[in-house]
Amino acid sequence: MTELLAALQEYSQERVIITGDLNADRDSGVVSLVMENTSLGQMASVHDLTLERYSTFKIRDKVLKRMIDFIFYQQGRFSVRESLDLLDPSILETHPDLQNGLPCRVYGSDHLHLYSVLSLL
């Protein structure tokens, strides 16, 4: 991530959106690095990172519910027009199709999809 952010510095005057499976939790150093990267200006997450929401839900040796997929945008250069909410943890735990985690017959991936519409400012 450090290399990506360093490479993006040459685009500091451009509008930048960073998306992806970071394989890092919302309170990780990787997410902090993106959010606190001053060369791109103040970055924000489309999803409220203070809420208990998950983008992946797996059952291996134990239950793994994590928020590791993100959409980051530059505050002041974009606004969020709409965004698909991530599933509430209670749905993940009670939905009959999710009893064995992801993937399942309803969701073909072990990650839930993220969706957002951003407007240029």
Image: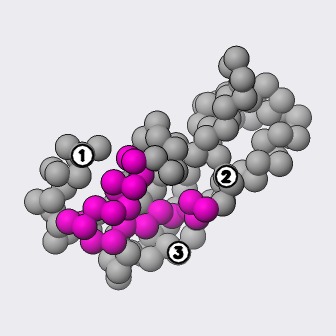
Pointer 3 local density, CA inside 10 Å: few below 14, some 14–19, many at least 20:
few
Please, what secondary structure does the residue beneath circle 3 have? strand
100, above or below 39, in the image: above
Which residue corresponds to mark 3?
81
Which residue corresponds to mark 2?
53
Please, what secondary structure does the residue beneath circle 1 have? helix
Query: Left or right: where does residue 23 sit relative to residue 105?
Result: left
Magenta stretch bounds: 29-50
Pointer 1 local density, CA inside 10 Å: few below 14, some 14–19, many at least 20:
few
Which residue corresponds to mark 1?
2
Quarter-of-image position of residue 120: bottom left
Query: Left or right: where does residue 10 sit relative to residue 77?
Result: left
Closer to the N terminus: mark 3 or mark 1?
1
Amino acid type for the residue under numbered disc 2: Arg
Quadrant location of the N terminus in the rendered image: top left
Of 120 and 65, which appears nearest the observer?
65
Could you give the CA–CA distance between mark 2 and mark 3, rounded to whole angstroms?
20 Å
Quadrant location of the C terminus in the rendered image: bottom left
